[in-house]
Image: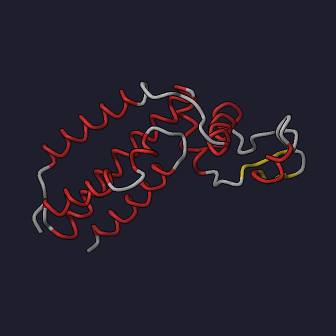
Amino acid sequence: MHELSCAPLCLWAAIAGLAAALASFLVPAAAFTIDDVIYIDMARAFATRGSLFVAADGGVDGAPVLAKNLMIVVGAAAAPQYPGGYAFIAAPFYALLGLRGLILLNALSGIASALLTFSLARRLTGDRRVALISAGLLVGAGFWSSYLFAVWPHMLALTMLLAGVRLAACAL
């Protein structure tokens, strides 16, 4: 298989990463769903207290239904129903830039997912055109742009999955 030189790919990756980083500061920094609020609370709790519990009183003030439907109450504390790994990765971004840091994390993850898709397709097929089409389909034919500048960790999860598959493909 024919490997692509890193120079052009690295240049495009740097340009795309910089553009995504800058754009992440231009989109509204707000929670759009209750899930966003919980992910923000997860990052904040880990960044400020080193805790995976988002509420210390066993519930969410003024909204007990959240504790019942979206939290797991353990003793006097409430933990989100979502995996805690996000809090570990997102906490430094939240500590540095608050909510904008979480959007930046997703924007950078989105660029990484497109590059990993290209790299994986190139590795498996040896065809640059197929790799470009594969990355283009990811970017243009799905929810990629919707998740790129949001708080939801979908981009981060996709990037981690693609990184694992790409590493496995190296063994082929």
Q: Is residue 78 above or below residue 97?
A: below
Is 55 displayed left or right of 5 in the figure? right
Estimate the x, y position of residue 114 in percent, counting from the top left: 31, 51
Estimate the x, y position of residue 22 in percent, counting from the top left: 36, 27
Snapshot quadrant of residue 149? top left
Q: Is residue 165 above or below residue 113?
A: below
| Residue at (88, 39) in percent of width and height | 57
| Residue at the front extreme of this rendering | 141
Snapshot quadrant of residue 24? top left
Snapshot quadrant of residue 44? top right
| Residue at (40, 62) in percent of width and height | 164
Is 71 displayed left or right of 152 in the figure? right
| Residue at (24, 64) in percent of width and height | 121
Estimate the x, y position of residue 117 in percent, counting from the top left: 30, 58
Estimate the x, y position of residue 74 in percent, counting from the top left: 85, 52
Number of labels in the image equals 0
Quadrant position of the C terminus in the picture: bottom left
| Residue at the bottom extreme of this rendering | 172
| Colour scheme | secondary structure
Query: Between 164 and 39, which is closer to the camera in this rendering?
Result: 39
Quadrant position of the N terminus in the picture: bottom left
Is 71 displayed left or right of 7 in the figure? right
Q: Is residue 58 above or below residue 135?
A: above
| Residue at (53, 43) in percent of width and height | 89
